[in-house]
Amino acid sequence: MTTLIRRYFVCVNGHDGEEVACDDDEPYSSQWDSIRTTGLVNNGRDSHGYASYTCKTCGELMSETGKR
């Protein structure tokens, strides 16, 4: 089954970004995963092991927010 997860982010200057993660763990098929970002720059991992990002526009740390 293919799973799609969206995470939304915003910086202190109001710029927003989005992470879209897809994976396929269907039995008897090849497994794959994909992560696309918009408006984000990778900044390693946070204390919970999730990807952390900075703003692509201004370089400030992005905070995860609820749905748009």
Image (tube, rainbow, N blue to C red):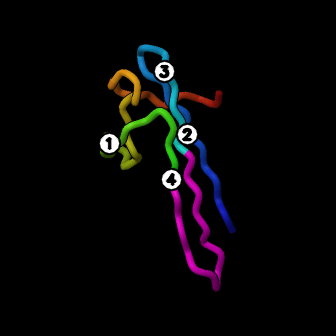
Mark 3 and mark 4: Cα distance apart in space:
20 Å
Pointer 1: residues within 10 angstroms few (<14), some, or many (20+)?
few
* Position in image of residue 9 (x %, y %): 50, 30
- Furthest-right residue in this view: 1
In this rendering, the answer to whether 33 lies above or below 38 is: below
Numbered marks: total? 4
Q: Quadrant where the N terminus lies?
A: bottom right
User: Judging from the image, what secondary structure is the residue with disc 2 in?
Assistant: strand
- Above or below residue 39? Residue 42 is below
Find disc 3 in the rendering and name its residue.
15
Specify the quadrant of the image occupied by residue 31.
Answer: bottom right
Relative to 40, is 38 on the left or the right?
A: right
Q: How far is the residue under mark 1 from the one under mark 3?
A: 23 Å
User: Mark 3 or mark 1, which is nearer the start of the sequence?
Assistant: 3
Q: Is residue 11 magenta?
A: no
Q: Earlier in the sequence, mark 3 or mark 4?
A: 3
The percent coordinates of residue 57 (x first, y second) are 40, 24
Q: Left of 21 or right of it: where is 48?
A: left
* Residue beneath disc 2: 7
Amino acid identity at mark 1: Ser
* Circle 3: element type: loop
* Number of the front mark, 3 or 2: 3
What residue type is disc 3 on? His
Q: Residue at x 43, y 14 (%)?
A: 13
Q: Residue at x 33, y 25 (%)?
A: 59
Q: Residue at x 52, y 25 (%)?
A: 16
Give, as a single range, the part of the protein colored magenta: 20-35
> How far is mark 2 from mark 1, CA to CA?
17 Å
Residue displayed at 63% across by 82% down = 29
Mark 1, residue position? 47
Q: Which mark is drawn over residue 35?
A: 4
Q: Could you say which quadrant of the image residue 3 lies in?
A: bottom right
